[in-house]
Amino acid sequence: MKLSGHKSLVDFYKYIKISPEEAGKKIKTIWENRTEPITN
């Protein structure tokens, strides 16, 4: 959203043409398939 300049998630999801549910599923899949541990 920082890159596209959208202020709300609703507008952002319309812009990228993906529903919040689809985004959640993709994030879950990526998270479950990650190979490197998350570090701060």
Image (tube, helix red, strand yellow):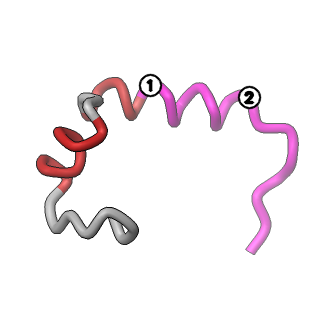
Q: Residue at x 29, y 30 (%)?
A: 18
Residue annotated with mark 1:
25
Q: Would you identify the image quadrant in which residue 8 lies?
A: bottom left
Residue annotated with mark 2:
33
Which quadrant of the rendered structure holds the N terminus? bottom left
Q: Is residue 23 above or below residue 40?
A: above
On screen, residue 27 versus residue 4, left or right, reads right
Q: Residue at x 39, y 67 (%)?
A: 3
Categorize mark 2 by other alpha carbons within 10 Å: few (<14), some (14-19), many (20+): few
Q: Please report the bounds of the magenta region as a residue range.
A: 25-40
Q: Would you identify the image quadrant in which residue 15 lies?
A: top left
On screen, residue 2 versus residue 13, left or right, reads right
Where residue 36 sits: x, y (%)? 86, 48
Circle 2 sits in a helix, a strand or a loop, which is it?
loop
Asked whether 38 or 16 is in front, the reply is 16
Where residue 24 sits: x, y (%)? 39, 33
Residue type indicated by callout 2: Asn
Is residue 28 covered in magenta? yes
Q: Which mark is residue 35?
A: none
Is residue 26 covered in magenta? yes
Kindly report the distance in space between the C-alpha atoms of the residues bearing marks 2 and 1. 12 Å
Which quadrant of the rendered structure holds the C terminus? bottom right
